Image: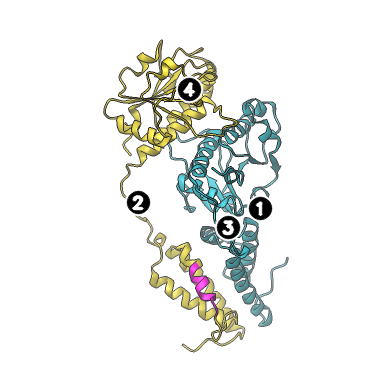
Chain colours: A yellow, B cyan
Amino acid sequence: MNPDLLQGVHIVLVGTTHPGNIGATARAMKNMGLSRLWLVQPRHFPHAEASVRASGADDILSAATVCPSLDEAIRDCALVLGTSARTRSIAWPELGIREGARRCVDQAPRGGAALVFGREKAGLSNDELDRCHFLTRIPCNPDFSSLNLAASVQVLSYELRMAAEADVGPAPAFEDPDDRPASAGELGHFYTHLQNLLIRLEFLDPRNPRHLMRRLRRLYNRVHPSRRELNILRGILTACGRHLDTTGGPPRPAP
Amino acid sequence: MNPDLLQGVHIVLVGTTHPGNIGATARAMKNMGLSRLWLVQPRHFPHAEASVRASGADDILSAATVCPSLDEAIRDCALVLGTSARTRSIAWPELGIREGARRCVDQAPRGGAALVFGREKAGLSNDELDRCHFLTRIPCNPDFSSLNLAASVQVLSYELRMAAEADVGPAPAFEDPDDRPASAGELGHFYTHLQNLLIRLEFLDPRNPRHLMRRLRRLYNRVHPSRRELNILRGILTACGRHLDTTGGPPRPAP
């Protein structure tokens, strides 16, 4: 993942009332790898409660820019996404949250993108929404839709990180060869071993096998065991067979 | 969206220290349409701070079940997903967060699913992780990875809702109840049965068990056996134990 993608996305909080929400926002941002925080006319900032809730993300708080208007916060951004819980009487153009996050990340290296969050109670004014290219809405229970402000920032920041991580390289190689998935041939030996033991245990009647081995194959094929796991399973079969040998259990089947 | 999908997903908080996190969890759950909350050995509950942070989700708090062990909380669930921030020395089977949420929603109407969250500082113990079919990890900044507990619940609950909203049409019902996935309790009985047999076979040394049972749990949790499959596996264990009884194998362990 290219961390610069997330550095180009700005989080803008407008008219925040509770300083604890500013701190929790900083923590959520830092957890997800974001760092650019703008505070438009916060009620109280700086504030001890913000620092407590930041819980180690103080660097985000001290680098935050306090400014008097939304226009100033978004001035350098090429894409501005507003967040909203309400359905508006005039429909603003909307983007789904996942698509919105992807566009922000796409935009970040070429001009920057802003995600704008409104006041705890009243959200963004229509005048502020006019500054946004798109609105996005976090899906929620229609009977209890007031997400906490920092929780909204958390969800959007998480989607930004998911979008940034979607540009990933090849899957990591297995460090230990025993962690590799067992081959079909290795599994085949296991099934033969298992079948012979089940016959000796008189659990499987070779004249009337029904679907027993098919069911067991389906089960173990589904689990896709590693070589290490297959070795454990074969070890159990061997231990069981050895006890049958020494204690006079039923004879081994002819090879 | 079928709201019942989210009703079948249980949120389990283990050993929560701060009651505020329990309240914020309830709010996050209700915002996303979840309602079943389990609290395993919470430090303080009920508590005024929990009610304040629930901010209107008091119904979730008053319906929450407090219980003494994780086993009790997940007993009726067919899929148990643990959450973890750390990379573990023994790799538990992992699911990506989006895939994990989708599977929980798929599982909800047929047996229920649980999402398990550990302690604020220490997460889940290895013993608790052994109860989980899969681990899931919220992607985050590796240099600042300690998400707030309620923020983690918020992100996962959001993904559950996204998965539920993407779901079209009802999940296929199982025609035969034996095709249902075995519950965690049924799997627990299987592990006890398997462990007792391995001790009798002298394959497992109870004084030096190493990671054997943990590896076997990981394997069978991953395969997610149906009740029918589990019955076959237990039948094999029983057949094996009966042979040891009649042929003078090692004695049964004391009950």
Q: Position of residue B116 (x, y in %)?
A: 58, 45
Residue designated by label 3: B173
Whole-angstrom CA distance, mark 3 to mark 1, is 21 Å
Is B214 above or below relative to A101?
Answer: below
Q: Residue at x 56, y 36 (%)?
A: B32
Q: Residue furthest bottom?
A: A254
Residue designated by label 4: A89
Label 3 resides on the chain identified as: B
For label 3, the SS is loop
Residue A172 - label:
2
Q: Name the chief secondary structure element in magenta.
A: helix
Q: Position of residue B103 (x, y in %)?
A: 51, 50
Q: Position of residue A186 (x, y in %)?
A: 41, 71
Name the residue nearer the viewer: B131 or A211: A211
Q: Which residue lies furthest to the top in this view?
A: A68
Is B53 above or below relative to B92?
Answer: above
Of the residues tagged 1 and 4, which is closer to the observer? Answer: 4
Of the residues tagged 2 and 4, which is closer to the observer? Answer: 4
Of the residues tagged 2 and 3, which is closer to the observer? Answer: 3
User: Tag 4 or tag 2, which sits nearer the N-term?
Assistant: 4
Label 1 resides on the chain identified as: B
Whole-angstrom CA distance, mark 1 to mark 4, is 47 Å
Name the residue nearer the viewer: A14 or A226: A14
Residue designated by label 1: B75
Q: What stretch is highlighted in magenta?
A: A210-218
For label 1, the SS is loop
Name the residue type under label 4.
Ser
Q: Residue at x 54, y 26 (%)?
A: A148
